[in-house]
Amino acid sequence: MEQRTDLLEIIEYINPAELDYQEWVNVGMALKHEGYPVDTWDAWSRNDSRYHAGECVKKWNTFRGSSVPVTAGTIVQMAIDHGWRPSYGGYSLDWDDEISMDGLVIEDAGWVERQEIREPREWDPVTEITRYLETLFEAGENVGYVMGSWKKTDEKGERWLPQKGTWDRTAGQLIELLAKCDGDIGAVLGDYNPEAGAWIRFNPMDGKGCKNENVAEFRYALVESDAMDLEQQNAIIRELELPVACLVFSGKKSLHAIVRVDAADYNEYRKRVDYLYSVCQKNGLKIDTQNKNPSRLSRMPGVTRNGKRQYIVDTNIGKANWNEWHEWIEGINDDLPDPESLEGVWNNLPELSSCLIDGVLRKGHKMLIAGPSKAGKSFALIELCIAIAEGRQWFEWNCAQGKVMYVNLELDRASCLHRFKDVYQALGWQAKSLQNIDIWNLRGKSVPMDKLAPKLIRRAAKKNYVAVIIDPIYKVITGDENSADQMANFCNQFDKVCTELGCAVIYCHHHSKGSQGGKKSMDRASGSGVFARDPDAMLDLIELDITDDLRKQEENKAVCAVCKRYLDTHYEWEDELSQDDLLSQARMMDYCKEHLGPARMKELQAQIDEELKAVSVRTAWRIDGTLREFPKFAPVNLWFDYPIHRPDDVGSLKDIQPDEEKPPWQRGTDKIKKNAKDRKADRKKALEEAIEGSNFGEAPTIKDVAGYLGVSERTARDRIKEHGGYTYEDGKVRKKG
């Protein structure tokens, strides 16, 4: 038999006017997931002054399902938060029936239809207290307890409160004395007021005090509820299989469950108790949250309280320990979809998402761009924003046109906006579709990704973005980036954004520090390997080492291009220069000197100098890709010509082998060569400085140069010879020519 919670009844406990936008949407998604019509959501939403006709239907049609759906449990929890309490009776169950409701699993009707509490037939206070001590403590552990009380009267009425108490005796000492007291527990523990009862601390103490800092072991937590009858408390505690070491009747209207949490320290204790209390509250057990402290007092069994006995109901019930219980409860609350038969969908397969970036990324998927510093990752993302907005090509890939949100976490607002304009201008594109680009500037205001995701979803819900670009993600990383499980949880936030908004999420991350030689592309990103293995597409930027010859080629092309542009504007040349001439820096400069006057040559030279300056800082990069949905593409070579990347259309970079792909022996050899080259350049520069500065601008002697450099005269002569630009005659060092 299947029993489904009636959400029509429960939803009446939730006031839509008290919900924010995302909570309102969650109610709609839960109703649709559970098979209710849109009319149910619409009728309920009319109770809010913010209601707009037709909005529910429009939003309803965007709910297309999710791998992590919003279920009835969300509505149930909202109702509980607004005062609704589930009824655990009212229908009969078969032995094999299962009811799930946001974490509550009921396998036997007897547990839910209240569980009777039986008072001990034989009242033996010594046995009660001894059993408690033996269950919770080792013989050598100090026990804190309070027998004294005082009466407090206030607006709540009269009640008995505990005094400071005792904490300097061990469980073993107390058990031994109780065995010899002939039933007189007062002779061992002290007398107590039978109107007030007595108290005991459930965690072992250090024997020096009774505060949290005096707790020796963070072994147990207290779960107490007085908001429902005792039989219901008993039933739910058992049904949740809480790892209860000892269950005690308080002598009034609550059970005290001493639950095993087995925490290593106070911080872990707090986390586990918060989790424990959350599970209890989600399942209708409204507990007293003031009982969180590890030094908290609980009711001592074996005494009376205003005519009623405080006694042990049971010991060692539920799961054996915290880990076993935690694993069990997490398994119940996985919120995962049911498996589906391939046969049922074989002839009706779902439609694949269309491409956002041809051959690289689909809509609704995730993409990571990884690279070292100075690779221009942020500029690459801005270029991608613009390409999507305009429906143009990004590098060599066509992009579908659509709206995009750029989440800026690093730059100040002005710098970010200027970058977009600079990139537009450098690309030479007309800004026809600026309305397709939204920028969310969050520098100085960013929050961890698990907090940012719902805020982002709420702001983007009605914008129909095809992509959300987050730059950079280190600003919003939650947890240790080297921890696989923490980073898996972090990356799941991107999935939430993709699922809820139906758009792609694109982000960038830096390479790890140090040499990347020998690493695969997906292992270069900083932190856990989850970063590279989680997205549907990963593009890795690898720097290429520009040789002197290649740099000279680029300078030659730059000079030729500047000369041609200038001649196109100022001189008729078409019939006078051949294709070979147009590719020769020397020939182009000679031609310009012959046909342009001094004023124009000065203007041309200024443009050439500016272009050569740009070439000097130009860097070269190769994009390697790891794709889940598409076949691997051939590496793409790029020039980063600030502020944009330009594809290497002529193939200048195709034969360059990056350090990461070279064998170790070659990387070592290249490093030696590079270091030797750098040292030679340093020597040349130092020599020039010495010659200029060793004799106040006059031609210095070999001795002057040697003294300035701090080397021998022989070494100074060798340096001059190595340099090649100087000579020494008549004992003087002079520049050649």
Image (cartoon, rainbow, N blue to C red):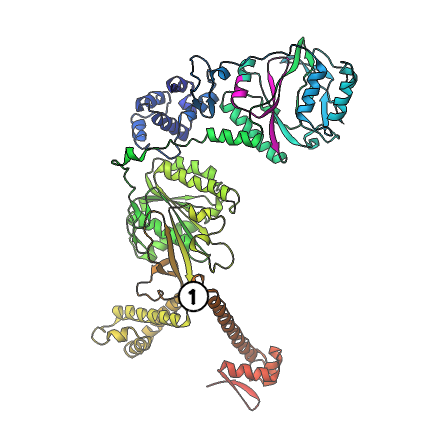
List x then y, in percent, for residue 308: 66, 10
What is the residue that sits farthest to the front in this orientation? 95
The quadrant in which residue 335 appears is top left
Which residue is at a point 47% across and 45% down the rendered structure image?
Answer: 443
The front one of 350 and 409 is 350
Residue linked to disc 1: 545
Left or right of 301, for residue 80: left
Q: Nearer the viewer, residue 720 or 677?
A: 677
Q: In x, y percent, where is residue 411?
A: 45, 49
Residue 229 visible in image: no
Looking at the rendered structure, the secondary structure element under dot 1 is loop
Which residues, given as a range, are shown in magenta? 235-263
Viewed as shown, does residue 204 lie left or right of 70? Answer: right
Q: Quadrant of residue 124?
A: top right
Q: Is residue 457 above or below residue 684?
A: above
Residue type (three-letter) at the residue carrying disc 1:
Asp
Where 63 falls versus 660 (above or below)? above
Residue positioned 36% across, 55% down in the render? 423
